[in-house]
Every structure is written in C-alpha cells, then in structure tokens.
Image: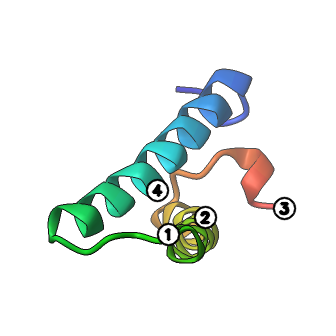
Amino acid sequence: MDRSATSYLVLHYTLLIGLILLVVETIERTGTSVPLWMGVIVALVVGFGYPRVVAAAGVAPERWES
C-alpha cells in the first residue's frame, strides 16, 4: 500500500483509536473502573506512543515522518 495515500493515513488513525479503546477495555476487564482522567492518560500515552512505534518499524504514513 502506498504510504503517502490518504487511505493509509486513515487506516492508521483507525488502528490508533481502536488500540486506545482496546487498552481501556482491557483495563476495565481486570475489574478496575477506569475514571475519565485515567482514560485520558491512556489515550495520551497510546496516542503519542503509537506513531513512534510504527515510525520505528518503518510502516508509518509519510505525513507522520516529518
């Protein structure tokens, strides 16, 4: 897939949002209630970490590499 295509960028944003929801759901399944502030922290950590991880793996959209 072309890394400069808009569809590739949308794919990664969709995966990013899905990963945030998955992490919060996993925390809640352990029996821990996730307050809003913790959800925001999880979203920030995943939101800043995901682009760095995919860039290091060499599969990030070109717009994230600048």
Q: CA distance from mark 2 to mark 1?
A: 11 Å
Q: CA distance from mark 3 to mark 1?
A: 15 Å
* Lower sequence index among marks 3 and 1: 1
In the structure shown, which secondary structural element does the residue marked by tag 2 occupy? helix
Q: Amino acid at mark 1?
A: Val
Task: Residue under label 2, please give it.
Answer: 47
Q: Position of residue 63 (x, y in %)?
A: 79, 48
At a point 52% along the width and 49% down the height, the residue shown is: 16
Q: Residue furthest right?
A: 66
Task: Residue under label 1, please give it.
Answer: 53
Where on the picture, by quarter, is residue 51? bottom right
Task: Residue under label 3, please give it.
Answer: 66
Q: Amino acid at mark 3?
A: Ser
Packing grade of label 1 (10 A; few <14, some 14-19, many >=20) is few
Q: CA distance from mark 4 to mark 1?
A: 14 Å
* Lower sequence index among marks 2 and 1: 2
Which of the two marks, 3 or 2, is nearer to us in this view? Answer: 2
At a point 74% along the width and 55% down the height, the residue shown is: 64
Q: Amino acid at mark 2?
A: Gly
Q: Residue furthest left?
A: 30
